[in-house]
Image: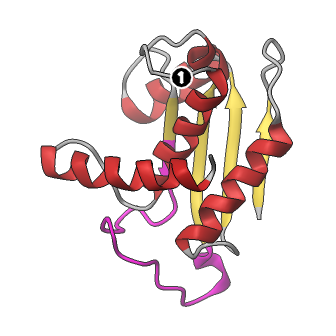
């Protein structure tokens, strides 16, 4: 089940459509019956999480908290009990993305789509620290963006 909580109130956002996109992505990846939590929030709130969990006292666009934090990129999650059917949680600062503080391409909705895709990739073990890993993650992101286009 996908749960989306929108705690920010300044920017109108199509939560139902975002839920449908998240479900399309999970279905495509073979995790259609897994749990995913998404919090749409403000710079102030994401800054608190960024400070508390990453020791970075600044707002950011998106944070990912994988349930399977030892999952290797490209490997499937092995389900041994119902609790394993959890991808994790995502926090997105809607205002950060709206104001496009990282100068991403596209309009607001496409940037929000990219945040969803990017975060799900992180939940599945991908990262972009090394160039080779960045390339693999970017390839998957491009595939997933086409899935929800």
Q: Is 80 within the magenta?
A: yes
Q: Could you tell me which residue is drawn at 82 percent across and 33 percent down?
A: 14
Figure quadrant of residue 147: bottom right
**Crowding near pointer 1: few (<14 within 10 Å), some, many (20+)?**
few
Q: Tell me the magenta residue range.
A: 64-85
Q: Could you tell me which residue is drawn at 21 percent across and 52 percent down?
A: 133
Compared to residue 31, the image places residue 54 above or below, namely above
Going by the image, does 96 lie left or right of 123? right
- Image x and y of residue 51, in percent: 45, 24
Magenta stretch mostly in which secondary structure?
loop
Q: Could you tell me which residue is drawn at 54 percent across and 86 percent down?
A: 79
Q: Could you tell me which residue is drawn at 61 percent across and 59 percent down?
A: 25
Q: Nearer the viewer, residue 92 or 102?
A: 102
Going by the image, does 27 lie left or right of 3? left
Residue indicated by mark 1: 106
Q: Nearer the viewer, residue 83 or 96?
A: 96
Q: Is 105 within the magenta?
A: no
Going by the image, does 140 lie left or right of 15? left
- Image x and y of residue 69, in percent: 40, 61
Q: Quadrant of the N terminus?
A: bottom right
């Amino acid at each position: 089940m996908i749960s989306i909580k929108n705690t920010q109130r300044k920017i109108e956002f199509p939560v139902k459509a975002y839920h449908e996109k998240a479900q399309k992505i999970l279905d495509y990846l073979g995790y259609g019956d897994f749990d995913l939590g998404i919090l749409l929030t403000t710079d102030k709130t994401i800054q608190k999480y960024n400070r508390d969990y990453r020791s970075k006292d600044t707002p950011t666009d998106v944070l990912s908290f994988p349930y399977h934090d030892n999952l290797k990129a490209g490997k499937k999650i092995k389900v041994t009990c119902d609790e394993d059917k959890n991808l994790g949680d995502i926090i997105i600062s809607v205002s950060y993305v709206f104001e496009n503080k990282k100068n991403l391409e596209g309009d607001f909705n496409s940037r929000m789509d990219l945040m969803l895709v990017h975060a799900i990739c992180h939940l599945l073990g991908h990262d972009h620290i090394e160039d080779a890993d960045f390339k693999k993650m970017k390839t998957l992101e491009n595939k997933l963006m086409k899935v929800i286009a």
